[in-house]
Each structure stands twice: as structure tokens, then as C-alpha cells.
Image: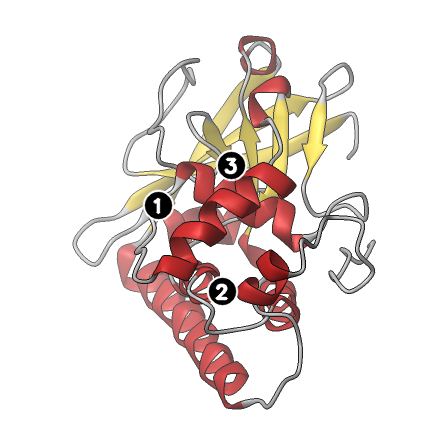
Amino acid sequence: MEKSVTVYHGSTHIVETPSYGLGRKNNDFGPGFYCTESIDLAKEWAVSSLSDGFANRYTLDTEYLNILNLNSPEYTILNWMAVLVDHRLFSIRTPVARRAKQYLIEHFGVNVNAYDLITGYRADDSYFDYAEAFLNNAITVEQLSHAMRLGKLGEQIVIKSKFGFSKIKYEGFEKAAKDTYYVLRKARNYGANQTYQNILEEETDGLYIQDIIRGGISNDDPRIPRNIPE
């Protein structure tokens, strides 16, 4: 990541001073200030079917920040999954899913609170469905990894620490019209749904979460897809 980056926060409000300690604990990576480097994506996140929104723009100084990049080759998609199941509320429909949640946290978990800044996939709309399907033993880890790579524009940047919040500077905003960006948001979700349906139709002999648990598989196992560098 460059020393100075421009990031955007999609919201129904203008946010001139992001506040440390706010945010829902059930967000992807827990409480924090969620941003993206894509202004168009921020505008999609800002709107609903009923209201316009704002893409708040900031300069972020990353030079001395302790950064966790969950999409780097150091980590796998299961590290992201472990962080996600530790924070988000999933539909646990089977005993396998209950065991899977605990196994992922114990064997692939990452302490996100040890970092100033986190980058990783955003589990938005259909991308959350992919994760939930994997947890419930419906798709393989290879299918999950492939689906998330196709959803790359869903990446987000999350400021976690008080020090990280001291490094962000408000620069202005752009309005996000619901008539434009809600349509784009729905189209993105539709495309993700189509990808998901195609994945479900694929025949695969890959690893399901039940195989991972039974095999005692850990993060260094070569069968777990590693993240691909840019």
C-alpha cells in the first residue's frame, strides 16, 4: 500500500470527523471505519432504494500504520473466513456449521485488534452468501476462493485503532444518487448471484469444510488455495 492513499466512505451522512470506537461489533472485521479506494463502490454502499447518499473522501497516511492485508499471499481465504465468522452473524443450520465456526476461529483466526488498518474482502450481499454456503458445507474452499476473486471490487479498507484514526483527513464529498447507484448495486449483486449459481452447478472434488475438520487441516496445507499477488 502506498504511503498516502485516497479512500472513500459511503454513508447517508457527511462524515467530516470519523470517530474512534464507533461502528457495529457485527461488521465484517468488528468495530471500525469502513472505506474503499473505489469512489463508485462507496457510492453504491451509500444509497438505498429510498434515499441518496454521500461518498466522503479522505486522505489516509499509512506510513507508520501496522497493516493487515488479508488478501496477501501470506494468508488464505480461510483466514478471512475465520475473521468473518468471529464477527458476523451467520445462519448456523447444521451441526457441521457449528463445528466449522469453532474450527475456523481456532485454526485460522487472526487477531484483527492488533492492527491499525485492515484490508480484505467485503462480505456484502451475495458474497456473504458464498461464505455462509461454505460454512454449511455446500461449496468447497476452492469454489469459495474462486468466487471471492471474481468479486474483487468488494475489497474494503478498515481503520481499527485510535492511532489509525489520527492518520485520516477529510477532503470533501460527492453526492450519490440512488437512481443511478442503487441500480448499479443491484446489478453487481445480480452478477454475483449468477456466479454463485454457476459455481453450485460445477462438479468438484475439492475440500468441503467437513473434510477440513476431519483431516485436521491447517493454514499451511498446500490444498488450501493461497491468495494470488497483484
* Secondary-structure class at tag 1: helix
Q: Which comes before the other along the chain, label 1 or label 2? A: 1
Q: Residue at x 54, y 39 (%)?
A: 105
Give how far apart the Cα atoms at labels 3 and 1 are: 11 Å
Question: Type of residue at label 2?
Answer: Phe
Q: Position of residue 10 (x, y in %)?
A: 40, 40
Q: In the image, which is nearer the foreground, mark 1 or mark 2?
A: 2
Q: Position of residue 200 (x, y in %)?
A: 49, 83
Residue under label 2:
134
Residue under label 1:
46
**Residue 202 visible in the snapshot:** yes
* Secondary-structure class at tag 2: helix
Residue under label 3:
35
On screen, residue 81 above or below 109: below
Give how far apart the Cα atoms at labels 2 and 3 are: 26 Å
Q: Which comes before the other along the chain, label 3 or label 1? A: 3
- Between 51 and 156, which is closer to the camera in this rendering? 156
* Horizontal side, residue 216 vs residue 22: left or right: right
Q: Which comes before the other along the chain, label 2 or label 3? A: 3
Please say if the residues under marks 2 and 3 sit with CB atoms less than 8 Å apart. Answer: no
Question: Type of residue at label 3?
Answer: Cys
